[in-house]
Image (spheres, rainbow, N blue to C red):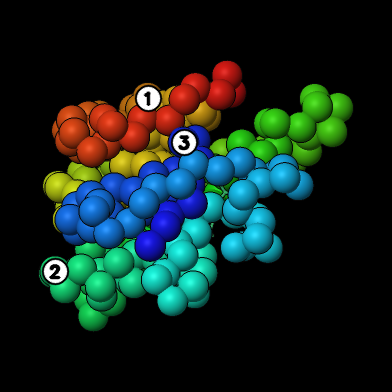
Amino acid sequence: MRLFFVPGSPYARAVRIAVAELGLGDRIAAVETTLRDPASTLLPYNPVGRVPALVLDDGTVLTETPLILATLDRISGQPPLLRLEDPAAMAAYGRVTGLLDGIAVWNRELRRPVQERSPGVIALEETRANRVADVLEAEGARGLHPGSRDAAAILLGCALGYCERRHTVWRWREGRPALAAWFDAFAERPVFQATVPPPSGI
Ligand SMILES: N[C@@H](CCC(=O)N[C@@H](CS)C(=O)NCC(=O)O)C(=O)O
């Protein structure tokens, strides 16, 4: 199997971490690709042009992070990272997905030339991100799985890790000591350290 990724993608990072956590590294080759590039090696496999994309042994190409995570869980035969039978785990995963999706929209806006940016979109996404982070903080990170045997925790680590390196305009740590402590503990894991994204200047 092959997993297409770019080093800066938090979604692909979550899948790369899951591959390692599930012990699938010897069965899945990580293939670095390019995005928004008509010559990208990804496009013949995934016309959507987004990562992560997982090419199965039979040629099926899976996209969308939760679908890939569920597939990795199935083929690993191990206790799942994405616990589809557990409503609380699904709720946590959905909330983190919403946070990350909003950050991605916000970040995309900041990559436009200044005169093309929408202040309204930026304000909406900043408010959304703060709202979710405040709830996580208010819960004292209680609902967060402490390790990387949980898909929501992995995705949150990747979302906050993205903000540390590629979306530093959001000062998510300020006033959120519990969330910051959770992230700092999570970030010590070797697989997380091995997948740190390059800085983007944003
Ligand atoms: N909903 C998708 C989001 C994936 C996504 O947005 N990936 C970004 C990289 S972080 C991408 O490939 N962007 C390229 C593009 O939009 O053209 C998932 O869950 O995997």
- Whole-percent x and y of residue 189? 17, 35
The CA span between labels 2 and 3 is 26 Å
For image coordinates 61% across by 41% down, the residue present is 34
Residue projecting furthest to the top: 201
Q: Quick one: which residue is furthest to the right in this view?
A: 115
Instruction: Report the front residue among 79 and 49.
Output: 49
**Mark 2 burial class by Cα count in 10 Å: few <14, some 14-19, many 20+:** few
Tell me the quadrant of the picture where the N terminus can be found.
bottom left
Q: Which mark is residue 78?
A: 2
Name the amino acid type tagged 1. Answer: Glu
Q: Earlier in the sequence, mark 2 or mark 1?
A: 2
110 vs 199, left or right, is right
The residue pinned by badge 3 equals 7
* Residue drawn at (76%, 32%) of the image: 112
Query: Marks 2 and 1: which is nearer the front?
Result: 2
The kind of residue tagged 2 is Gln
Query: Horizontal and vertical percent for residue 170?
Result: 50, 28
Q: Which mark is residue 174?
A: 1
The quarter in which the C terminus is drawn is top right
The residue lying at 60 percent from left, 63 percent from top is 45
Measure how far apart labels 2 and 1 are at the Cα level: 37 Å
> What residue do we see at 38% from left, 37% from top?
160
Q: Is mark 3 within 8 Å of ligand 1?
A: no
